Image: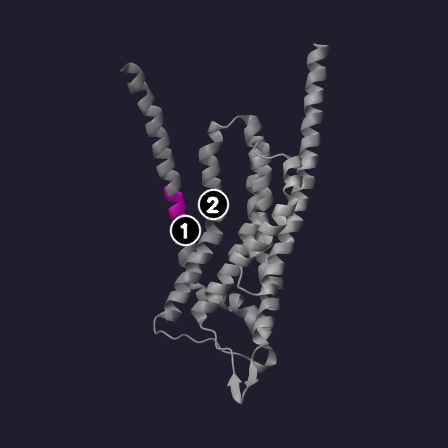
Amino acid sequence: MKDIDDSKAPLLDHLIELRGRLLKCVYALFITGAICFYFSEQLFAILVHPLKEAFGDAGGRLVYTKLYEAFFVQVKIAVFGAFCLSFPIIANQLWAFVAPGLYAKEKKALLPFIIATPFLFAMGASLAYFVVMPTAFHFFLEFQGNSSGLQVEALPSADAYLGLVMQFILAFGISFLMPVLLMLLNRAGFVSRAQLIGLRRYMIVAAFILAAVLTPPDVVSQLMLAVPLLLLYEITIIAIWFTDRKQAKDVSVAETADAAN
């Protein structure tokens, strides 16, 4: 009974700490969400810029077909912006909770991946915003014109457009985290560099299937996601070669030191 009583305090301390860190994450989401809602019009203007450029000098229109649609578009922008802005705070709280239970070697191994995650997500989102969306929107708007005497005009709704933009940004941002996942699996011993090389042909198929699922059903968007995924896969294989070489060198140095002692 004494052992059980002694074990309750640390568990309770961990739960109290977890509660405090979760509250900090919730506060960060609410504060950033309120800020994003206040600036939702400016943020929507940024998100709509690729479509505006695709329409060109002729101009275009965004419509909303439900009375409450414009308001909920602002709410969605606030929620989406809150998750993006508060992610560093959430990741920091998660790391602060997990780190005390890790060895120094494990901290050293995991910290680069935690730092790399937001940068890789930002790279994928930037590719989607600056390259993929303008190209895809130009492609979609080419179907405007005259068809059998009828004028065909693109009139996207604000909600549908925002959903498409979020789909692009999340698809590319999350997909660009693949190197982090593969490197972690390699560090944990689940996959080796030789296995990744052997799975290369399957990765080609998987990249195009993933691109078909995550992007709109057009060839342009799918190619623009599948090709970077394959390049990231090859870069990951090269990075694992360097890490394996460094680990082998460290083991050799340690064995030499032990032999000398």
State yes or no: residue 175 in magenta.
no
| Residue located beneath label 1 in the image | 29
Q: Name the residue at 38% across, 48% down.
A: 27
* Rendered position, 237 above or below 157: above
Kind of residue at badge 2: Ile
Q: Is residue 112 visible?
A: no
Residue bounds of the magenta highlight = 23-28
Q: Are marks 1 and 2 in contact (CB under 8 Å)?
A: no
Q: Is residue 184 visible?
A: yes
- Between residue 124 and residue 235, name the one nearer to us: 235
Q: Residue furthest top?
A: 261
Residue at screen point 44% across, 64% down: 40
Is 127 displayed left or right of 214 in the figure?
Answer: right
Q: Which residue is mark 2?
A: 89
Please give the count of numbered marks on the rendered protein. 2
Split into 4 quadrants, where in the image is the N terminus?
top left
* Location of residue 86 in the rendering, given as x and y in whole percent from the top left corner: 46, 50
